[in-house]
Image (cartoon, grey):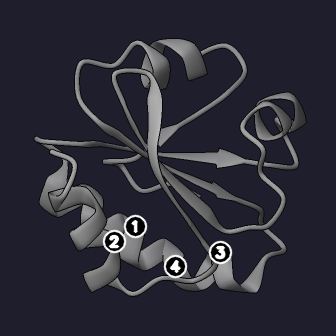
């Protein structure tokens, strides 16, 4: 379900793509059945196009990867977390406007 500028996260690539990333990484924790997740998906796609050179944009399907979901304390979706130097610097829960997500990115790059 991810666009071409978005990294699909898995158990095998999460550490490399997120925790060891040189760039900040915005991770969208989502599920296919989640209506707000589907509503925010086009916004995340737009961010990937606009910020792809400065920030990695990634998605993790919480149903497919419960271990990572649990270890990141995800209780509600969508949850968008921005990682920098392997650490979570900010977390937003629920549908967010594009402006709010841009603000979150701009404050941390």
Residue density around tag 3, few if under 14, some if 14–19, many if 20 or more, within 10 Å = many
In the displayed structure image, the side of residue 12 where residue 98 appears, left or right: left
Numbered circles on residues, count: 4
Earlier sequence position, callout 3 versus callout 2: 3
Would you say the residues marked 3 and 4 are in contact, meaning their CB atoms lie under 8 Å apart? yes
Q: Which mark is residue 44?
A: 1
Helix or strand or loop: what does disc 3 sit on?
A: helix
In the displayed structure image, the side of residue 83 where residue 92 appears, left or right: right
Residue density around tag 4, few if under 14, some if 14–19, many if 20 or more, within 10 Å = some
> How far apart are the two marked residues, 2 and 4, measured between alpha carbons?
10 Å
Helix or strand or loop: what does disc 2 sit on?
A: helix
In the displayed structure image, the side of residue 79 where residue 32 appears, left or right: right
Task: Give coordinates of residue 101: x percent, y percent.
Answer: 33, 71
Whether residue 79 is situated above or below residue 88 in the rendered picture: below
In the displayed structure image, the side of residue 23 where residue 14 appears, left or right: right
Would you say the residues marked 2 and 4 are in contact, meaning their CB atoms lie under 8 Å apart? no
For this rendering, which residue is in front, 48 or 109? 109
For this rendering, which residue is in front, 74 or 58? 74
> How far apart are the two marked residues, 3 and 2, measured between alpha carbons?
14 Å
Earlier sequence position, callout 2 versus callout 4: 4
Residue linked to disc 2: 101
Residue density around tag 1, few if under 14, some if 14–19, many if 20 or more, within 10 Å = many
Badge nearest the viewer, 2 or 4: 2
Residue linked to disc 3: 37
Would you say the residues marked 3 and 1 are in contact, meaning their CB atoms lie under 8 Å apart? no
> How far apart are the two marked residues, 4 and 1, measured between alpha carbons?
6 Å
Would you say the residues marked 1 and 2 are in contact, meaning their CB atoms lie under 8 Å apart? yes
The image quarter in which residue 50 lies: bottom left
Q: Which mark is residue 40?
A: 4
Helix or strand or loop: what does disc 1 sit on?
A: helix
Residue in the image at 34% along x and 21% along y: 85
């Amino acid at each position: 379900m991810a666009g071409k500028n978005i990294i699909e996260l898995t158990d095998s690539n999460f550490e490399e793509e997120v925790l060891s990333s040189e760039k900040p990484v915005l991770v969208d924790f989502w599920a296919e059945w989640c209506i707000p997740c589907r509503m925010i998906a086009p916004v995340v796609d737009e961010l990937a196009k606009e910020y792809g050179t400065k920030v990695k944009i990634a998605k993790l399907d919480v149903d497919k990867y419960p271990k990572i979901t649990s270890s990141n304390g995800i209780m509600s979706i969508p949850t968008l977390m921005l990682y920098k130097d392997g650490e979570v610097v900010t977390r937003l829960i629920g549908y967010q406007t594009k402006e709010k997500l841009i603000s979150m990115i701009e404050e941390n790059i």
